[in-house]
Image (cartoon, rainbow, N blue to C red):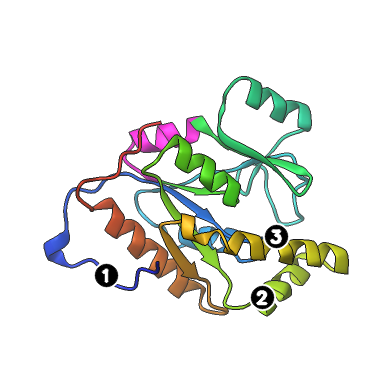
Amino acid sequence: MNWVGSLSNDSLREITALIVVIAGPSGVGKDVLIERMDEIGQIGFHFTVTATTRQPRPDETDGINHLFFSDNEFQNLIATDELLEWAFVYGNYYGVPKKQVQEALSNGNHVIIRVDVQGAKRVRELIPDALLLFIIPPSIDVLRKHLKLRGVNSEPEMNKRLAAAAEEISQSDAFDYVVTNEENHLDETVKRVVEIIEYESSRMPPRKTII
């Protein structure tokens, strides 16, 4: 379901801090979308920094883009129950630090979490009222182009990623909203996502975000 409206003054109510999950296939632009939301300075939003065991890309900084851990360090995070959810994806571990989420909610901030489809389902199991947004590409060709720009050039790996994307898109009905990330219209996508969060955060009865 796509949200295309906007809040009217009559519908404004007390704002509820939400846990917002943003998911979508590899290459759809989730990171760019979240980075743009952060750049334009959304007040009252906390963007979780995901823990991972993958190697940082050349333009990434530890603690800003991701929290980079060794396999042993990540296993310790799991063992000590420090992660809200975690997954093993494309040969690496990814997880959401629980402390970040708890602190942000206690400060009245919306928590933005970037995970894969399976991670989104786990968050929904843990927090049934979490707001789930699924980002889709305008076409598979656009997704293929993004994956090539990311460095996925081998045909077997490309086919693997595109097959996974098709499977993930087929599960988008499990999400509250589906938003198309149109090519070269990033700010419009950001606007739609922010409108959805604003609408849902003023909804009555409010969503419950107890961890």
Which residue in the structure is indicated by mark 2?
140
Mark count:
3
Mark 1: secondary structure = loop
Left or right: residue 138 versus residue 155 is left
Which residue in the structure is indicated by mark 1?
6
Q: Earlier in the sequence, mark 1 or mark 3?
A: 1
Check the picture and name the quadrant holding the N terminus: bottom left
For the point 63% across and 61% down, the residue is 25
Amino acid at dot 2: Ile
Task: Let me know if residue 154 appears in the view.
Answer: no
The verdict on residue 88 being magenta is no
Mark 2: secondary structure = helix
Residue 13 x, y percent position in the rendering: 16, 52
Residue 59 x, y percent position in the rendering: 71, 57
Mark 3 and mark 2 in contact (Cβ < 8 Å)? no
Does 78 appear above or below 191?
above
Left or right: residue 115 versus residue 145 is left
Does 134 appear above or below 79?
below
Please report the bounds of the magenta region as a residue range.
99-110
The verdict on residue 100 being magenta is yes
Give the Cα separation between the discs numbered 1 and 3.
Answer: 33 Å
Mark carried by residue 164: 3
Give the Cα separation between the discs numbered 2 and 3.
Answer: 12 Å
Amino acid at dot 1: Ser
Residue 183 x, y percent position in the rendering: 57, 79
Mark 1 and mark 2 in contact (Cβ < 8 Å)? no
Left or right: residue 203 versus residue 106 is left
Give the Cα separation between the discs numbered 2 and 1.
Answer: 29 Å
Check the picture and name the quadrant holding the C terminus: top left
Mark 3: secondary structure = helix
Looking at the magenta stretch, what is its main secondary structure? helix
Mark carried by residue 182: none
